[in-house]
Image: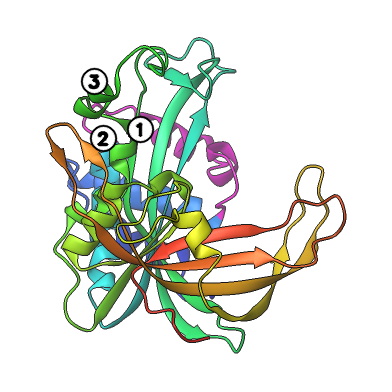
Amino acid sequence: MNPTLSTPAQWAQQQFALARLGDQRRTQRLVKIATRLAQNPGGTLPQALPRWKELKAAYRFFGQPKVGPLEVQTPHWEAARSRCRQPGEYLLIEDATQLDYSCHPATQDLGPIGNGGGRGLLLHTTLAVRVEQWTLEQRPEGIALGLFFQQSWVRTGPPKRGRETWRQRLKRPRQSQCWARALDQTEPPPPGSQWIFLADREADFYEPIEHCQRRGVDFIIRSYRDRAQTDAPEHLQQAAGQLPVRGTMTVELRARAGAAARTATVQVRSGQLTLKGPERPGEAKPAFTVNVVEAREVNAPPGVAALHWTLLTSLPCERW
């Protein structure tokens, strides 16, 4: 991706000058802090603010009861959403992570993370990227516009898995409900502006797909559930392996724990399937039609698990 051409000071002014913090001096302090952090994005606060006077002012700023994540981030979200309403193609890349503060035992107001053994916060982020062009390898090149939306919260109590029924789980607020919630924060995209929601397997359930369809947003979601079809006995994964072959491509895989970096050759199939809607308390959701893309590695090295991805999308995928 290409970096933006704004200087750190220009960027901070554009993103935070309209923050409503109850006092203009607080807004000015926020712009100064954002400028310093943009100049040293990988550093800590003491590294970004080496002068004690500025560092102390930053700590005092973040300690203000009227200054919270919502007040600080809202003008930045609004700026990113406004840019997404201009004509063009935009990727809304969504993912979840955990902020681990287990090594800070004195910190209060944290909740369980992971398997319940750690303490911290849950964070869900939607990053907006404007696609500038597509390479000859059909890979997008774009500019990161900023955060479209971000949520953080504390999980309360131990994991409930195994201690409640399916109906009880679906009736209470759930962590999964954060997926695609960013689309509720603004009006649907205007004509000439195409938004594409991108998410990993955690988002493979009915509601995010329904949400995108209702809001006029395209989507690409990595498949996790082996859904039933409405008009054929084969389930999704088996049916995807029977779709027409569109071609082959190479994928560069980065190194991971226990696995070296390598180049995988994958065979790509695609087609349209109509899948059964899920059961929900009091109702059965209607069937829905999606385009399905399967990428399966051919001739994987001995002893290496072959790459295999299945994607659900609203985008056309009949041509290579």
In this picture, residue 86 sits left or right of residue 117: left
> Image quadrant of residue 284?
top left
Q: Position of residue 183 (x, y in %)?
A: 23, 56
Task: Report if residue 98 lies within the magenta region.
Answer: no
Please count the marks in the image: 3
Q: Is residue 64 left or right of residue 59?
A: left
Task: Tell me, for residue 27, which label it has, or none.
Answer: none
Q: Nearer the viewer, residue 168 or 230?
A: 230
Residue 214 vertical position relative to residue 141 in the rendered view, above or below = above
Magenta region: 40-68
- Real-space Cα distance between discs 3 and 1? 39 Å
The structure residue drawn at horizontal position 50% and vertical position 64%, both measured from the top left corner, is 240
Residue at image coords 37%, 51%: 228
Q: Looking at the picture, how far across and down is residue 181, in whole percent? A: 25, 48
Q: Which residue is mark 1?
A: 62
Give percent across and percent down for residue 5: 47, 76
Sequence-first disc among 1 and 2: 1
Q: Are marks 1 and 2 in contact (CB under 8 Å)?
A: yes
| Neighbour tally class for label 2: few under 14, some 14-19, many 20 plus, Cα within 10 Å | some
From the viewer's perspective, tell me whether residue 206 is left or right of residue 291: left
Q: In the rendered image, which residue does mark 2 sit on? A: 67
The local crowd at label 3, few if under 14, some if 14 to 19, many if 20 or more residues have their Cα within 10 Å, is few
Q: Name the outermost residue toward the bottom.
A: 136
Amino acid type, mark 3? Gln
Magenta highlight on residue 55? yes
Query: Looking at the picture, which amino acid does disc 1 mark?
Result: Phe
Q: How is the image coloured?
A: rainbow
**Secondary structure state at the residue bearing disc 1:** helix
Q: Nearer the viewer, mark 2 or mark 3?
A: 3
The answer to which quarter of the image holds residue 67 is top left
